[in-house]
């Protein structure tokens, strides 16, 4: 799939055309931002992308955008904080596609907040999405990845834990 919005820029891609042909990729947090960019790129390289997020409308729009550009994509709602919902998502991917080759753990819940006034609920929310959600998705994906002959897990992180970052103690701790 060639993204005409890129013009000639995609001819400079470091990735071989068709790199992910026949493969299935799941991108959490794929409805916006970095996740949406990753989903679009994977689809442009031939993957069928399962775009997942809590907000089904957002991922349906992202998947429709990929399909309109000639790629293959489907949308799935999931709250990565809920292990049973994550297991159900992976079962659905297995039922629909028969495989999973790549999991991109991108879901995140970040906001700026001073540590001294952050509520325990706010702290837990980010830890549950950024840390626990990454584990739950990886754990549930392993059987599918193994059954596909191996595969890859990519965890989107940040470098804030090296130096810290004002108002981001929760995200820094979750992604360290």
Image: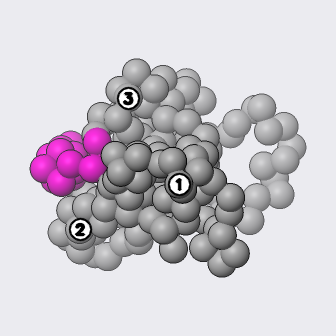
Counting from the top left corner in percent of width and height, residue 29 is at 45, 44
Q: How is the image coloured?
A: one colour
The residue segment tinted magenta is 79-96
Residue 95 vertical position relative to residue 166 in the rendered view, above or below? above
Of the numbered discs 2 and 3, the one sitting upstream in the chain is: 3
Mark in front: 1 vs 2? 1
Q: CA distance from mark 1 to mark 2?
A: 33 Å
Which numbered marker is on residue 55?
Answer: 3
**Which residue position is annotated with label 2?**
139
Which numbered marker is on residue 116?
Answer: 1
Q: Residue sitting at 68 percent across and 63 percent down?
A: 165
The answer to whether the residue labelled 1 contacts the one labelled 2, judged by CB atoms less than 8 Å apart, is no
Label total for image: 3
Residue 50 visible (yes or no):
no
Q: CA distance from mark 2 to mark 3?
A: 22 Å
Residue 92 vertical position relative to residue 116 in the rendered view, above or below? above
């Amino acid at each position: 799939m060639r993204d005409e919005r890129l013009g000639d820029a995609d001819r400079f891609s470091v990735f071989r055309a068709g790199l992910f042909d026949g493969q299935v990729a799941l991108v959490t947090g794929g409805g916006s931002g970095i996740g949406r960019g990753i989903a679009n790129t994977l689809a442009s390289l031939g993957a069928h992308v399962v775009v997942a997020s809590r907000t089904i409308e957002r991922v349906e729009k992202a998947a429709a955008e990929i399909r309109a550009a000639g790629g293959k994509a489907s949308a799935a709602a999931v709250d990565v904080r809920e292990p049973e919902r994550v297991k159900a998502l992976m079962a659905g991917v297995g039922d629909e596609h028969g495989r999973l080759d790549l999991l991109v753990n991108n879901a995140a819940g970040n906001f700026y907040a001073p540590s001294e006034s952050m509520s325990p609920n706010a702290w837990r929310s980010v830890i549950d999405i950024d840390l626990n959600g990454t584990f739950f998705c990886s754990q549930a994906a392993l059987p599918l990845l193994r059954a596909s002959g191996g595969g890859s897990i990519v965890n989107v992180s940040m470098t804030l834990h090296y130096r810290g970052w004002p108002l981001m103690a929760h995200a820094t701790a979750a992604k360290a």
